[in-house]
Image (cartoon, rainbow, N blue to C red):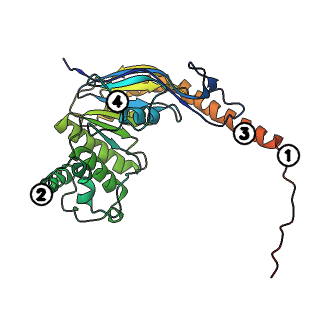
Amino acid sequence: MMSTKIKAESIYRIYKVRNVEGDNSHITNHNGHEGLLALDNVNLEIKQGEFVALVGPSGCGKSTFLDILGGLATPNSGDIYIDGKPVKGPGLDRGIVFQGYALFPWRTIQHNIEFGLEIKGIPKNERKDIALKYLKLVGLEGFENRYPYELSGGMKQRVAIARALAFDPEILLMDEPFGALDAQTREVLQIELLRIWEETHKTIVFVTHSIDEAIFLADRVVIMTARPGKIKSDIRIDLPRPRLEGDLKSSPEFARYRHELWELLRDEVDKAEEQASENIRGAAAHQEEKPAAAWQPQKQSAV
């Protein structure tokens, strides 16, 4: 039986922001502080080697939760544990892949991948061997001396994945890593990621807006509510692995999961859109109430 790798207990995250009329998420929270409630009592357990996808409408707190898990942000209350130890900040046990690649433009592809290895104090020759190994793993063998500006978006994302894997983290956190890519490249990299996961069996937490992507990749799909973000459902995806061959997305089983997840997500998307509309109306009304500033001529300097 797989052991628990990640455990989130009663995670609350409140942002101090300027109050906007019409936004019902600005509340007095459970500690008596006023602010925007982004995450509301989130509890989640992830097993060693699981691939878990987080899906929810925009603004529901998916990326906030990932930031807390990565140690890049702290909750207002609650704790996240990895192997039973509380997360106190960033660590080399977690690799993070963002949507925006975050590569160093002045470094070659090889030296970008070596970055985490340098932090770990790995000797130079060993760093090179590891970097070349992971370049080959992501299908970029021969590109080690290129610079990021010489690569396509899909190739840059492969480098970001290789860099996150190279220092051998136990957990891979991925925040919409394929969101900015064209449809064809996105599908290629989904298959590439599954192939890498089949080889490494890292624990992966993957944020996405795409139901199809979540079903295709994950062991479990966690549906989050509109803000404030809570876990609405946790659906196990019992599709056979490996999922690298055949047209799985056209199967009746895949369609059944797509329908089930969309039914769970539909109301949350509607709520998120209504929240956004209320915020826009409230901001517009607030702006209209402001008196127009009186125009005054500018003083001219003597010449």
Badge 1 marks a residue whose secondary structure is loop
Q: Residue at x 83, y 40 (%)?
A: 289
Above or below residue 37? Residue 134 is below
Q: Tell me the number on the disc at residue 18.
A: none
Residue annotated with mark 1: 291
Of tags 4 and 3, the one toward the viewer is 4
Q: Tell me the number on the disc at residue 87.
A: 4
Of tags 1 and 4, the one toward the viewer is 4
Badge 4 marks a residue whose secondary structure is loop
Residue annotated with mark 3: 283
Q: CA distance from mark 4 to mark 3?
A: 37 Å
Figure quadrant of the C terminus: bottom right
Q: Amino acid at mark 4?
A: Val
Badge 2 marks a residue whose secondary structure is helix
Q: CA distance from mark 1 to mark 4?
A: 48 Å
Above or below residue 115? Residue 25 is above
